[in-house]
Amino acid sequence: MKLSITNFIDKVRSIYKEDFVPLHRPILKGNEKKYLQDCIDSNFVSSAGEMIIDFEKMIASYTKSKYAVSTSNGTSALHISLLLSGVEENTEVITQALTFVATGNAISYCNAKPIFLDVDKSTMGLCPQALSKFLHENTYSRENSLFNKSTDRRISACVPMHTFGHPCQIEEIYNICKEFNLPLVEDAAESLGSFYKGNHTGKYGLISAISFNGNKVITTGGGGMIVTDDEELAKKAKHITTTAKIPHQYEYIHDEIGYNYRMPNLNAALGIAQFENLKKFLEKKRKISEEYASFFDSFDDVKFFKEPESAFSNYWLNAIILNDSNEKNKFLKVTNEANIMTRPIWKLLSSLDMFVDCETDELVNSRWLEKRVINIPSSVPND
Ligand SMILES: *Cc1c(COP(=O)(O)O)cnc(C)c1O
C-alpha cells in the first residue's frame, strides 16, 4: 500500500491532542517550579550554586562517567571537549557530513578544519568502514601523530555523532581510532538515554558532549555537559569553562584564556527536575516509536527508522525514510500546512557555504539519506 498522508495526520492527531504539534517540546510538569522557586529563595540564580553540583553528579552517575562538567550549552561543551583533546589551529577533525551545524561550528571555533565522511544507512551516524578506509588510504603517522597525506596537516580528533539519538557503531569507531592513535570525541548532544552494548553514548570518547537545549530529551532551557573518565581533563574542563580563575580568597588571578561557559544554577534546577522524569520520558518515547513503527509497517513506500543493532535508542527524534525522494516536498508541505511539524534531515554540512571547501569522501549514503529522511513529531505526549 502507498503511504497516505491523511492517515499519517490522523495518526499524529491520535497521539498528540494539540492544535499545533511541534517536533519536540519539553514537558515541565514535575518539580521544575519548586526547584526554580528554591533557587530564587536561596538567591543563587547565577553561575554558582548547589544545584549545578547536584546536576553534574546525576549526569555522571547516569552515564557512568567518572566526571561531568556543566556548560552553557551543548555547542560550548563540544568546543571545550575538542580543545582539551588537542584540537588546535590548522589541524583537521574528522566528522560526519550528516549532522547538525553545531558539530562543524565547534570544530571551526578551534580554528580547525572538518573532514566530512559518510554515514551508515543503518545508524545515520559515522560509518566505521568509511573512517577506516579514509585513515588507511589518506593518512600517515609521524611521531605518534596522524597527518593527512594531501594537506600535511595533523588530524587531531574524530567526532562521530549519534543521529536523532540512535547510537552509531561507536565501539567499532573506538577501535579504529585507537589503532590510529586518534583522539575520539563523541557528539552525544542528542543521545542522553541512548546506549551501545550497554554503555551510555559518550562513554567511548576520551571526552564527550551532551546538550540540554529546549528540544532535546530533557532540557535546562539551554545547557550542556562534558563527560569524561579522565580526572585531568575534567579538572581542565571545569577550569577553562569558568574563566580559568585560580581559587583565591579575594584576588583575581586567571592563568590562561578562559571561557564563560558556565551553566547558571537556575538552569541546573530545571535540569534536576527534568532528570527526575528521564526514565518516564524514555519509556513514553519508546511507546510512541512503537506506535509509529506499526503504523508505517503497512506501507511499502516508506520505512520507519528503528534503533540499530546492539543499541538502545532514546528515540529522540523519530524519522522516516521515503522510497521516492520526489515525495519528500509534498509530505513536508501537506503536514506542515496541517499544523503538524515535520522537517527534512539537515543539509549535508559539506554543502553549506562555510564548509564547501572541506575534504569529503564520496558521501554515497549521506546523499541518499539527505534526499529521503523526514523527522516527525516526537515529544512525550501531554497526559
Ligand atoms: C543540539 C545539538 C548540539 C548543540 O547543542 P546546543 O545545546 O543547542 O548548543 C550539537 N550537536 C548536535 C548534533 C545537536 O543536535
Image (spheres, rainbow, N blue to C red):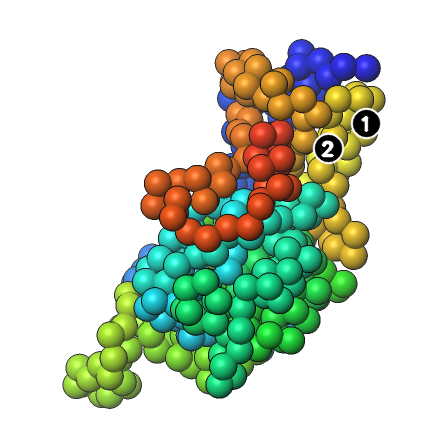
Q: Residue furthest bottom?
A: 248
Residue behind label 1 places its C-beta within 8 angstroms of ligand 1: no
Nearer-the-camera pick, 70 or 277:
70
Q: Give coordinates of residue 319: x percent, y percent.
A: 65, 35
Indicate which disc, 1 or 2, sits on the residue closer to the N terminus.
1
Residue at the (68%, 71%) spot, across then down: 175
The part of the image, by quadrant, that contains residue 241 is bottom left
The kind of secondary structure element at disc 1 is helix
Quarter residue 275 falls in: bottom right
Q: Is residue 244 above or below residue 32?
A: below
Identify the residue position indicated by label 1 in the image. 297
Decide which of 84, 31 is in the foreground and name it. 84
* Left or right of 158 on screen, residue 129: right
- Residue identified by numbered label 2: 304
Q: Residues within 10 Å of mark 2 (few under 14, many from 20)?
A: many
Q: Residue at x 67, y 11 (%)?
A: 6
| Residue 173 badge | none
User: Hey, what amino acid is under mark 1?
Assistant: Asp
Mark 1 to mark 2 CA distance (whole Å):
8 Å
Classify 170 as above or below 354. below
Residue 70 at least partly seen: no
Disc 1 and disc 2 in contact, CB within 8 angstroms? yes
Q: Residue at x 60, y 63 (%)?
A: 137
Above-or-below relation of 83 to 265:
below
Q: Would residue 350 be visible to someone looking at this image?
A: yes
Relative side of 9 to 18, left or right: right
Residue in the image at 42% along x and 51% along y: 358
Which residue is nearer to you in this view: 320 or 378? 320
Q: Amino acid at mark 2?
A: Phe
